[in-house]
Image: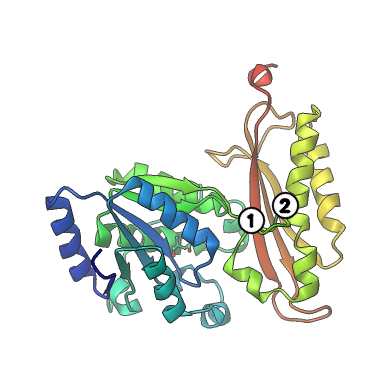
Amino acid sequence: MSPMRVVKTVHELQAMADLERRAGSRIALVPTMGALHRGHLSLIDIARRHADRVWVSIFVNPSQFDAAGDLEAYPRPLAADLAACRGKGVDAVFVPEAREIYPAGSQTWVNVTELSRPLCGTSRPGHFRGVTTVVAKLLIAAKPHVAVFGEKDFQQLAVIRRMVRDLGLDVEIVGGKTVRESDGLALSSRNQRLDTGARRQARVLSKSLDAAERAVAAEERDSARLLHLVRSEIEKAPRAEIAYVELRDPESLEPAPPRLTGSTLLALAVGFRPNPGATGAPVRLIDNRVLHLPPEEENSP
Ligand code: PAF
């Protein structure tokens, strides 16, 4: 096996992609912002099943952060990330500087207008424009056949799929299942910022999703009642500050009807203050579940 390559420029990565493509190899890209955890490693495993060459990009993308403080505080354990990639047999890691991705005078943006608006887009205007712009640039740089993204960021995945369809990009987008801690908490680099108390309380996210799933299995079809149930579960955690709890169509992200009639996305964002009484911004966690109605009811009135 050849040693893992660490690539810093778009030009070098494009040249590598051309060589691999000419040799008939399939390339899979796993775009990340580093601080790799088991969730990312599972995306690398998925990428391996789809391609001959697995490439990971590590780039903390400034344009998707709403607050400068958040960008500065974002963890950058590059040596550990490279070691993790090596351990997974990754073929190349792309670690560009910001000026490589956003050359001086940069003024080109990719914006998926409607899907970027609800849910996380409401409180983070410009966030998804930053995501789609950087992902488009990474796809242009790596020329992958497949790119893999986590389903935990459900809206991000929907927005990226829309962008790829709208621009006619020749890449398959694959979603990877959310990886969870043993108590159900979805893995996220943000989890490290929770103190012990908040970490314990953060279990309410997955518990509330489980409660909704059980309610749907017990024939609950009323959106308002389901939302109330989920909110009450989350509110059992005294430090949880709900940003949103919403039921939406999993593709269009349009609000679900009052009476649920098909597969429905339940999406949550909940903040936890770093310490009780602290004034700093809460650590915001997201999670989601697609609730599947029993097939015989899919089209019932
Ligand atoms: O999900 C992420 O880590 C980022 O939003 C992504 C897709 C790598 C773009 O910066």
Residue 180: mark in rendering:
1
Callout 1–callout 2 Cβ contact below 8 Å:
yes
- The type of residue carrying mark 2 is Ser
Q: Nearer the viewer, residue 244 or 153?
A: 153
Image location (x, y in percent) of residue 65: 51, 71
Q: Residue at 68% across / 19% down in the picture? A: 297
Residue 200: mark in rendering:
none
Query: In which quadrant of the rendered image does the N terminus lie?
Result: bottom left
Local SS, label 2: helix
Q: Residue at 77% across / 74% down in the picture? A: 196
Residue 206: mark in rendering:
2
- The type of residue carrying mark 1 is Arg
**Depicted 102 relative to depicted 140: above or below:** below
Image location (x, y in percent) of residue 276: 83, 78
Residues packed near mark 1 inside 10 Å, few (<14), some (14 to 19) or many (20 plus):
some
Residues packed near mark 2 inside 10 Å, few (<14), some (14 to 19) or many (20 plus):
many
Query: Is 283 left, or right, of 1 in this rendering?
Result: right
Q: Nearer the viewer, residue 288 or 168?
A: 288
Q: Farthest residue toward the front?
A: 1
Query: Is 138 left, or right, of 117 in this rendering?
Result: left
Report the colour scheme. rainbow
Q: Residue at 41% across / 68% down in the picture? A: 87
**Depicted 80 relative to depicted 217: above or below:** below
Image location (x, y in percent) of residue 228: 83, 44
Image location (x, y in percent) of residue 125: 54, 63
Local SS, label 1: loop
Can residue 238 be spotted in the picture? yes
Q: CA distance from mark 1 to mark 2?
A: 9 Å
